[in-house]
Amino acid sequence: MPESLPPDLVDLRDRVQAFIDDDLRPLDDALGDDANAPVPSETRQRVRERSRELGFFGMTQPKAFGGSQAGPLALTVVRETLAAANLRVAGGVFGPGPGVLGAAEGDLRERYLEPLLRGEKRGAWAFTEPGDAPRPTWAKRDGDDLLVTGRKAYVSGGADADFYSVLVNVEEDGAGAGGTAMVVVDRELPGLTIERAFESMEGGGHVELAFDAVRVPQARVVGRIGEGMPRALGNIGQMRLGMAAQATGLSMWVTEYVERHITQPHRSGTRLGDREGVRLHYGDLRIGTFAARATLYRAARLAEAASKPEDALNEGMAAKVFCTEHAGRAVDTAVQLVGGAALIKGHPLERLYRQVRSMRIAEGASDILRLNIARGRIEFDAGRL
Ligand SMILES: Cc1cc2nc3c(=O)[nH]c(=O)nc-3n(C[C@H](O)[C@H](O)[C@H](O)COP(=O)(O)OP(=O)(O)OC[C@H]3O[C@@H](n4cnc5c(N)ncnc54)[C@H](O)[C@@H]3O)c2cc1C
């Protein structure tokens, strides 16, 4: 639970809060009242520099590459505290993580992982298939190469990426067994096209990719053929816990926002918070946020104690579903209690409404995760209560 953190994590939380109060909040205030105001690149740069100086930037980066790789619990503390401040400028606090390239060796490490962590190259994650795909993206061996064919949808940051980490199904043939593989594909390779670029409602930019027999050296497979899906799942587990932390921090911000709103004078002459019906909604908000924090920290502790990511996979999914669904209800309640002003474009709740809605789909749609949790228990005897 957040109140039984060891002293070093309490100190970490205090340091994040000081970073927010001394650096991030003034930069955020300078953007003005419009919650959708773009963050200028100089501000992003300033956040990155200050985060580096204070030691937060490297927390998502391995020690072998000069980072300070923090564990799941420490990252949860930082992510939740940052989200509870609901700042537009918080995007640059963490440096790029290795993602699925974490175990890359040799050429893959030098050409992609190291420049990625130094911020010299950008990568994007291509996992999701379009709804109308006739078959999942596949690859067949051709000498030392793979020929990759298919399509990928919703590749976030794909328009600016130098390379994509693509999940493919390699066909079995005389040269070897088939199976899923994570392949690094350069953006400029012949046969790879960006079919469509679009923005989603929370402000993210994505592309849809088409691969037409794109020739990729087999040396660009991360690990071995057959390891693609486990590697993808290992990576996604951390992302889900991160999203649960973000959703919970935002729920904390919303709860405090509602409290301020309902305890201020209202034109009716009676504070909204003095009405029983409003108190019931506010009470529910507090109960849900309390439960979300309890869920988040339990999942983070289990992830911290796990010897391999699979040991806390089910709990990470449970936390992601619970915390993001609560955040959705919390923002919806807040919009209702604040009224029409919350619907005006640029209001912080208008922005949050769009932001938290996407969280129930990104990194695994809620219902799919529910099915996975049920399957984990019924078919693999995995998962705790
Ligand atoms: C903001 C954002 C960023 C994203 N970034 C990336 C990215 O960088 N890379 C990437 O690869 N993907 C990315 N995605 C894609 C994301 O992972 C998918 O949208 C998500 O996994 C759901 O897949 P889908 O959209 O194809 O929906 P579908 O799989 O078609 O599911 C749609 C709905 O159908 C229902 N459903 C589907 N199957 C079942 C079932 N078996 N039983 C019951 N109900 C079911 C559920 O209600 C589900 O929500 C991103 C998505 C968003 C919103």
Image (spheres, grey):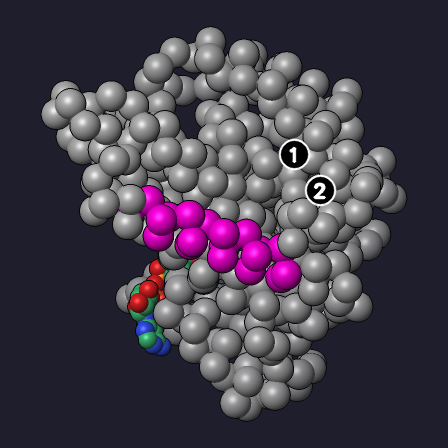
Q: CA distance from mark 2 to mark 1?
A: 6 Å
Residue 260 in the image, given as x and y percentages of width and height: 36, 28
Identify the residue at horizontal 75%, vertical 67% (top origin).
Answer: 306
User: For numbered disc 2, what is the local secondary structure?
Assistant: helix
User: How crowded is the residue under tag 2: few (<14 C-alpha within 10 Å), some, or many (20+)?
Assistant: many
Residue 95 in the image, given as x and y percentages of width and height: 67, 34
- 366 w.r.t. 161: above or below: below
The secondary structure making up most of the magenta span is helix
Q: Is residue 189 visible?
A: no
Q: Which residue position is annotated with label 2?
A: 60
Residue type at mark 2 is Thr
Residue 42: say if magenta. Answer: no
Q: Which residue of the protein is positioned furthest toward the left in this rendering?
A: 268
Identify the residue at horizontal 46%, vertical 13% (top origin).
Answer: 29
Q: Which residue position is annotated with label 1?
A: 94
User: For numbered disc 1, what is the local secondary structure?
Assistant: loop
Quarter of the image with the N terminus is: bottom right
Residue type at mark 1 is Phe
Tag 2 near tag 1, CB within 8 Å: yes
Q: Which residue of the protein is positioned furthest toward the bottom in this rendering?
A: 379
Please report the bounds of the magenta region as a residue range.
Answer: 281-299
Give the quadrant of residue 236.
Answer: bottom right
- 281 w.r.t. 218: above or below: above
Residue 382 lies left or right of residue 132; in this view the side is right
Q: Which residue of the protein is positioned furthest toward the right in this rendering?
A: 64
